[in-house]
Image (cartoon, rainbow, N blue to C red):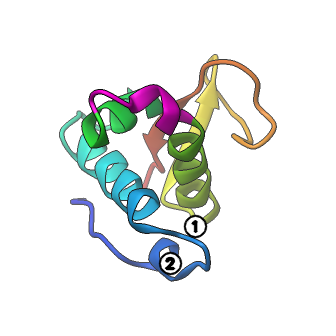
Amino acid sequence: MPWRGGGATSTLGGVDDVDARLEQVIGALLDDRRAGATICPSEAARAVDPDGWRELMPAARAAAGRLAAAGRVEVTQRGEVVDVGTARGPVRVRRVAG
């Protein structure tokens, strides 16, 4: 199913332009992958700001967390679904199966 901008995540308080852009890019990157494929939040950060992507990593992980809370994606670590807010180390993002 193609990604659609907006939805529950864009109506949450405190989501600024960069946060919304990261959410959109996560969706677009997943749209470009086969079903079941994952992305790293760093891919979204690099797409939004190729030079300053490292500084965007906390925001990219938070964007993935908001999308997961909205039921649009799952955040995984070593193949298991995790809470990105408490996960330490690298995580991956995938579409919710369905």
Q: Residues within 10 Å of mark 2 (few under 14, many from 20)?
A: few
Boundaries of the magenta span: 50-57
- Residue 42 falls inside the magenta stretch: no
Residue labelled with disc 2: 8
Q: Main secondary structure of the magenta part?
A: helix
Eyeballing the image, is 84 above or below 18?
above
Residue 3 falls in image quadrant: bottom left
In contact (CB < 8 Å): disc 2 and disc 1: yes
Q: Is residue 57 left or right of residue 43?
A: right
- Of the numbered discs in the image, which one, if any, rests on residue 96? none
Residue 78 falls in image quadrant: top right
Q: What's the residue type where badge 2 is placed? A: Ala
Residue at 52% across, 52% down: 63
Residue at 47% across, 68% down: 16
Q: What's the residue type where badge 1 is placed? A: Ala
Task: Looking at the image, tell me whether mark 2 or mark 1 is earlier in sequence order.
Answer: 2
Q: Residues within 10 Å of mark 1 (few under 14, many from 20)?
A: few
Residue at 74% across, 42% down: 83
Q: Is residue 12 visible?
A: yes
- Name the spot of residue 38 as percent of width and height, x first: 40, 30
- Of the numbered discs in the image, which one, if any, rests on residue 70? 1
- Name the spot of residue 30 as percent of width and height, x first: 30, 42
Eyeballing the image, is 61 above or below 24?
above
- Name the spot of residue 70 as percent of width and height, x first: 57, 67
Residue at 60% across, 49% down: 62
- Name the spot of residue 79 as percent of width and height, x first: 60, 22
